[in-house]
């Protein structure tokens, strides 16, 4: 599969990406890289008619990183790297998805969000999704 490559339009990240050294190394050890269809900024749909205060709120998400995976069984996952307000370390949230089409964002949520994960947790969940 081809990975969709999107360029961030915002200025460089202001977040201090503070991850454990093992997690940083682990991130380069993605067992599911062949199933990665999107890696880039977290995507929210923005409407042109939205109020300015909404855009102020949406800027909070500009530093988040998202990875979308798809497997042959028509399941996938959206994993988002972010820094929780109450923690100094970066964490992942992951939601299992059901693939609806060819575009990276053509999916619907098939499960609830699994929160506050480490990279190893994300890899283990992806193992389970792939084997379903």
Image (cartoon, rainbow, N blue to C red):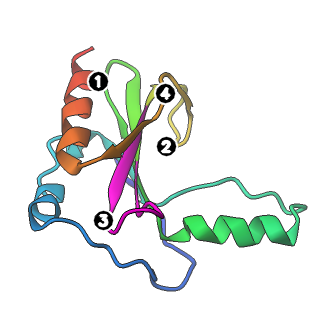
How far from the left and from the top, in percent, is residue 92?
Answer: 35, 50
**What residue is disc 4 on?**
112
Q: Per the image, is 83 magenta?
A: yes
State how far apart marks 3 and 2 are (Cα): 28 Å
Vertical arrangement, residue 46 with respect to residue 106, above or below: below
Mark 2 Cα within 10 Å, few/some/many (few <14, many 20+)? many
Q: Per the image, is 81 magenta?
A: yes
State which quarter of the image contains the N terminus. top left
Viewer-nearest of discs 4 and 3:
3
**What residue is disc 1 on?**
129
* Helix, strand or loop status at disc 4: loop
State how far apart marks 2 and 4 are (Cα): 19 Å
Foreground of the two, 34 or 109: 109
Q: What's drawn in magenta, residue-wise?
A: 80-95
**What residue is disc 3 on?**
89
How far from the left and from the top, in percent, is residue 91?
Answer: 33, 55
51 to the left or right of 66: right
How far from the left and from the top, in percent, is residue 80?
Answer: 42, 51
* Helix, strand or loop status at disc 3: loop
């Amino acid at each position: 599969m081809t990975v969709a490559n999107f360029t961030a339009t915002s200025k460089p990240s202001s977040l201090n990406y503070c991850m454990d050294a093992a997690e940083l190394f682990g991130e380069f050890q993605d067992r599911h890289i062949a199933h990665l269809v999107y890696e880039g900024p977290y995507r929210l749909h923005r409407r042109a008619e939205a109020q300015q205060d909404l855009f102020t709120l949406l800027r909070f998400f500009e530093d988040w990183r998202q990875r979308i995976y798809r497997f042959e069984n028509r399941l996938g996952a959206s994993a988002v790297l972010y820094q929780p307000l109450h923690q100094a370390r970066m964490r992942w949230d992951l939601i299992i998805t059901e693939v609806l089409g060819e575009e990276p964002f053509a999916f619907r949520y098939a499960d609830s969000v699994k929160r506050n994960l480490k990279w190893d947790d994300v890899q283990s969940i992806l193992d389970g999704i792939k084997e379903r």
